[in-house]
Amino acid sequence: MKSIAFFALTLALIPLQSSLSALPDKPGQEKSSSSRGRIDWNKGTLFATGLGAINRKEGDDAKSYLRARSFARMDARRNLLAIIDSVKIDSMTTGQDYEAQNETIREQISGLLKGTEIVSERTITIGNGKMVEVTVSMPLYGENGLSSVYVPEIVERNRMVLPSTTPEDTSEDALEIPRLPAPADPPKIFQPREDVGPAHAAISDGPITAVIIDARGMNVERSMSPKIRRRDGSEVWGTLKVSPEFVIDQGIVAYATSMGDAKKNRRVGGNPLVIKAAGRTGGRFTTDVVITDEDADTLLQSNKKDGFLKEFRVVSLLDPGK
């Protein structure tokens, strides 16, 4: 009990920023509000650190280290939960919202946390004391990733609001490019841009393999289920109507911070359509990109012919660290 009290007291005196030294800033990383972890959207991984005080008074250095390591892992998992809570699902909801509304989701998240392992550890000195600092990680995607919990719920919620015709409809009976109605109260467009230029591909007459939305400079926020919208707020793409298993492993979109990395992404292929964003929009969070009507029509017409959107061949090119 004394060691537990010592651990709790020591942690209370540690500046939260100290544990970030193991998690350097990198493009595509989003710092959580707790400053004890990050989401690397480019790599699809969540990281969190934890600290455990080494109580030298116990006399056995090996046991003291292992006890401190165990406390540090618990602390890291607690911090990882805070990161999970902060993950933006879409422009209106976070992981915390999903967990608050669904007990099953809370239980599934708890199971994922118990399965996390330490990916790095070290001993650090803070003041006059020694601490064990550990880092744990969790994948965003895959059967053991966050998407395995959230994507089925995203799909289920989409089904409840899914319109009868969605923009990615590629049926032979569709005589014109489908277009969803604009919302009655269109969302505000931030950083509107007029001089975006037309959508283009390297091989103009070849099949389009994917779309890259260049939203650099728009301060778009990353989320698990973003949408592409027109200037009137109507949806171009983003509402899921597929089996959740299809996107659990890949994610709904991929994120990149350079055009080179975007084109290297495995979902892009050899001839992506590149579209310059005309703004950003959303609700609580501005996670949705806005494109012009002309580019929206080009995107949907290309998809009608080549069908890349149904395979989620979408890469969002954003500013680092947003």
Image: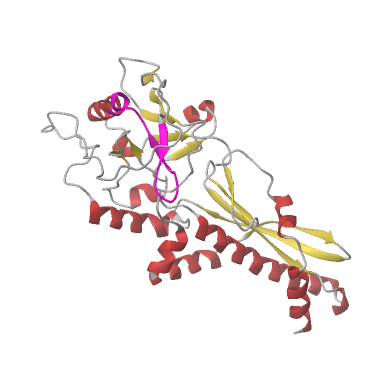
Residue 196, percent from left and from top: 41, 22
Magenta-drawn stretch contains 290: yes
Residue 218, percent from left and from top: 49, 34
At 40% from the left and 16% from the top, the residue drawn is 202
At 35% from the left and 37% from the top, the residue drawn is 228
User: How many numbered discs?
Assistant: 0
Q: Is residue 239 visible?
A: yes
At 25% from the left and 37% from the top, the residue drawn is 168
Q: Quadrant of residue 130?
A: bottom right
Which range is magenta?
279-296
At 86% from the left and 63% from the top, the residue drawn is 127
Colour logic = secondary structure
Image quarter of the N terminus: bottom right
Up the image or down, 278 lies above or below 249; here it is: above
Image quarter of the C terminus: top right
Residue 41, percent from left and from top: 52, 44
Up the image or down, 217 lies above or below 205; here it is: below
Q: Quadrant of residue 321?
A: top right
Q: Is residue 186 left or right of residue 315?
A: left
Up the image or down, 303 lies above or below 62; here it is: above
Residue reaching furthest bottom? 1
Q: Is residue 266 visible?
A: no
Q: Is residue 30 left or right of residue 312?
A: right
Q: Nearer the viewer, residue 225 or 190?
A: 190
Residue 184, percent from left and from top: 24, 45
Up the image or down, 70 lies above or below 23; here it is: below
Magenta-drawn stretch contains 223: no
Q: Nearer the viewer, residue 25 or 172?
A: 25
